[in-house]
Amino acid sequence: SASIHTFHSMEYANVGSCLGTLDLTGTHGLTDSILSQVICSGSFPRIQRLSLKNSRKLTGKAVANLVKLRDLRAVDVGGCFNIHPNDVIEMVQQHPGTNKGTLNEIYAGGLGWTDVALETLLSFTSKHLRGLGIGFSTYLSGPGLVLMLAKAAETLDRLSIPFCTGVDDAVVSALGKALPKLAVLDIRGCNKVSSLTGIMDGRIIAGNGGAEVANHLFVLARYSGISNNSLEETSRLYRNEVGECIFDCVLDGGGTGGGVRR
């Protein structure tokens, strides 16, 4: 836990003048007022990557203040259940980094995304979006997900869609074709996905069609429907010229840091 005194101490010590990454994941004492009065007040001008994940006292008022962090490139508000997708959309739309194409990673799982909300977000981020997290969204449809994400095909290389009930084998296969640059995929809890063969086939189709395809795919798939036998079968099929598997898939609790951009 942290109080406003903690953040004021950081402010007085001039820590913010050289801090580029700030991880406040699960900070119980973090409130809207601390974020607006300290972190977004000008004392932390160089922050590029900010995680507020699971800081559950935060509301849309806190998100609105993020426009003051002009160098922000990546933000994570996943699990902040008092924040609505529209709060994220409005902040991203108004942030100066959106017009410049520098605010390019948005992680906001667990907020209740819908097809309409995702379409709105991508309407002004699709040309530069590199990372997206919209997991735990029961109202997202599989076809809508593929249709919207295809707009970010030129740039999107990290996608987190865990526990999205609309994601199945057909959707994952379509994503493989639609997002050839994808390097990291989180489909944990998507129990309708039983194989990675479809997504690998899709990537090959995309490559044969002239698209630039990422050399390697890292997948988190714990609690999905993928079995060890299924994984072994797919790994035998997809190998590079020297016989190495061209994807990694984690079915247990490990690997959660493997796809983190640093």
Image (spheres, rainbow, N blue to C red):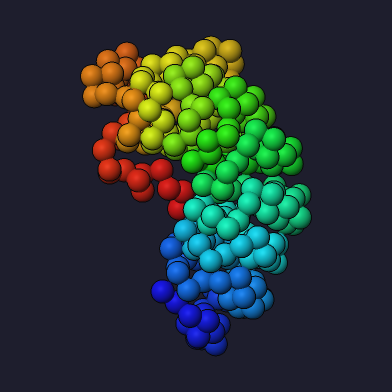
Residue 144 pos. (x, y %): 63, 26
Q: Which of 20 and 12 lies nearest the eye of the viewer?
A: 12
| Left-right relation of 89 to 249 | right
Residue 113 pos. (x, y %): 60, 41
Q: Is residue 63 above or below residue 167?
A: below
**On the image, which quarter does residue 27 sit in?**
bottom left
Residue 155 pos. (x, y %): 61, 35
Image mark count: 0
Q: Is residue 10 visible?
A: no
Q: Is residue 162 above or below residue 231?
A: below
| Left-right relation of 115 to 217 | right
| x 58%, y 12%: residue | 209
Q: Which of 19 and 106 lies nearest the eye of the viewer?
A: 106
| Left-right relation of 225 to 182 | left
| x 54%, y 55%: residue | 81
**On the image, which quarter does residue 43 sit in?**
bottom right
**On the image, which quarter does residue 68 sit in?**
bottom right
Q: Which of 14 and 10 lies nearest the eye of the viewer?
A: 10
Residue 186 pos. (x, y %): 43, 37
Q: Is residue 173 above or below residue 133?
A: above
| x 46%, y 48%: residue | 261
| x 27%, y 43%: residue | 253
Q: Quadrant of the N terminus?
A: bottom left
Q: Is residue 86 above or below residue 247?
A: below
Q: Is residue 135 visible?
A: yes
